[in-house]
Image: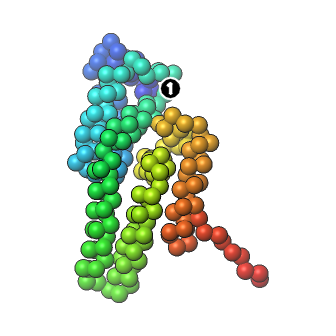
Amino acid sequence: MSTDGDIIRRSLSAPAAFAELFDRHARVVGAFASRRVGAEAAEDIVSETFLTAFRRRADFDVAYESAKPWLFGIAVRLMRHHRSVEAAHWRSIVAAATVAAEGHDGDIVAAADRVDAATTLRELAPALTALSARDRETLQLYAWSDLTYEELAVVLGIPVGTVRSRLNRVRRRLGDVIPGGAGQEVRHEPA
């Protein structure tokens, strides 16, 4: 099996070979973009990501086996231009959760779970929007892209330690909102 670097190297003389890179990574880039900016905008992001990658393929360091961090880096930069779509997406998630929790007939336990989830989501949405754009972007990449810390560092163009510190800061801030969250102290009672 050829590496992404091999595919890109081949595509420099045979541009049609680049389609293999699209086949390998479009689904995961699209899934991340869909969660981040919504399904409609995600199609444009995926198209623009691979078009940009194709145009800039000569700039890719073929020593890397995987082009996934490079592609996510392009996608993230493109999504920065879609911030208003992202905010609308969060508002629609909160609204949908609220409607589902209030308007569903079912057993009491399931209804209570939906109300709890909707309440947590309503409390979480402002905390997410209060995060800095860099922290929110790091969290979303971590949660939705299935990238390692090292790959996140490549995507974001920052050291791995910075990725870790951003995610730690996010966990602390969101833990204050989510009951039993990571930001809350765990107290051990004496036995």
Helix, strand, or loop for circle 1? loop
**Toward which corner of the image does residue 185 lie, by quadrant?**
bottom right
Residue extending furthest toward the left: 40
Tell me residue 89's x, y (percent): 30, 56
* Location of the C terminus (image quadrant): bottom right
Q: Can residue 161 be seen here?
A: yes
For image coordinates 39% across by 68% down, the residue present is: 121
Tell me if I can see residue 142 in this picture: no
In the depicted structure, whether residue 78 falls above or below residue 138? above
Q: Nearer the viewer, residue 24 or 183?
A: 183
In this picture, residue 101 sits left or right of residue 148: left
Residue that carries the numbered disc 1 in the rendered image: 64
Vertical arrangement, residue 180 with respect to residue 111, above or below: above
Please, which residue is most extreme toward the top here? Answer: 13
Residue at 38% x, 37% y is 77
Tell me if 153 is positioned left or right of 14 in this view.
right
**Relative to the observer, which residue lies in front, 95 or 113?**
95
Q: Residue at x 35, y 50 (%)?
A: 36
Q: Position of residue 134 (x, y in %)?
A: 47, 46
Percent coordinates x, y for residue 32 in the rendering: 37, 47
Q: Eyeballing the image, is 79 above or below 11?
A: below
Residue 152 point in image, percent of width and height:
50, 41
Q: Decide: is 2 above or below 75.
A: above
